[in-house]
Structures are given as C-alpha cells and as structure tokens.
Amino acid sequence: MNFRRARTEEVEINLTPLIDVVFLLLIFFMVSTTFTKETRLAITLPEADGLVAEEQAKPVEVVVGAEGDYVVNGERLVKNDAQTLRAVLSNLTESSEYSLIITADANARHQAVVTLMDVAGQLGYVNLSITTREPIQE
C-alpha cells in the first residue's frame, strides 16, 4: 500500500495583531505622559506706596552695598562677613527690641541680604524692615 504522507503545514505566528496592540500601547503612553518643563521665573520687585510707620525708638539701620559691603548706622564694617556683622550688631544694642531697617542696593547680592537677616534673627531681632522706593510718577 502506498500511503500518502499528510502534508504538514508550516506553523506561523501571525504578528499583525501583536504589532497593532504594540502601536496602540505606544500611542496611549505618548498621549498620557506629561513632560516637565524647566521654567525660570521673571520677577519684578515690588514698589510700596504705603505710609511710613511711626518709629518707637531709634532703629538700627544697615545698608547693604552693591558689592555686598555693610554699613551699620553710618559706619562701614572692616570685614564683610557674618562674624563681624554679628559682633557689631550685638554690641550696638543691649536689647533686641530695637527694630532693624535693611536698605539694600538693587544690585546687591541676595546672599548678603540673607546673611544680614540670618545674623539679626540669631541675635533675636524681631522687627525687621526692608526699605523700598516710591514709584516713579510719570
């Protein structure tokens, strides 16, 4: 007897549905993903047109120059570091009840102002004021 051999079909995996699913997942993830943008703040410092507050006692006035140098009550400090500033402010008043007025140049480094505020806070000054300029009338 002559038996015919059954033809064996080659087994193939149909990849078309798999590719479709992968593309749908790709589109889903692309649409649902949020991207963070690095942003920079453009700020304009405020002007104040409020009235000047009444002063109780003579305040301590510290001027921060454009180069980060300090002038305390009209006297320039020899060194512009936190230790010298701390020594001058602690010797200036026995009580920290005095108010401290900070006048900083517009081009002064922010670190110089923060150092001054930090030293004043460590010494116990509770009334800190920052001076502003009046708006230009046009």
Image: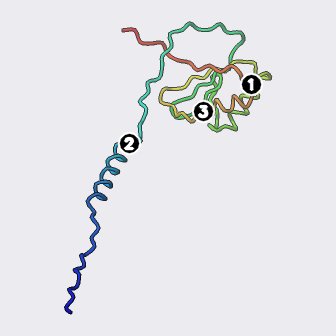
Kind of residue at disc 2:
Ser
Left or right of 98? Residue 37 is left
Q: Residues within 10 Å of mark 1 (few under 14, many from 20)?
A: few
Q: Earlier in the sequence, mark 1 or mark 3?
A: 1
Dots 1, 3 in contact, CB < 8 A? no
The mark lying in front, picked from 3 and 2, is: 2
Residue 24 locus on image (x, y percent): 31, 50
| Point 62% across, 34% down: residue | 115
Mark nearer the viewer, 2 or 1: 2
In contact (CB < 8 Å): disc 3 and disc 2: no
Viewer-proximal residue among 37 and 71: 37
Give whichever of discs 2 and 1 has the lower sequence position: 2
Pointer 2 residue: 32
**Which residue sits at x=47%, y=23%?**
45
Q: Which residue is mark 1?
A: 92
Q: Tell me which amino acid carries mark 3.
A: Val
- Is residue 49 or residue 104 the one in the foreground? 49
- Residue 127's image quarter? top right
Q: Work out how far the residue at label 1 is from the one at label 3, CA to CA, in angstroms.
A: 20 Å
Residue bearing the label numbered 3: 114
Q: Would you place residue 131 above or below residue 121 in this image?
A: above
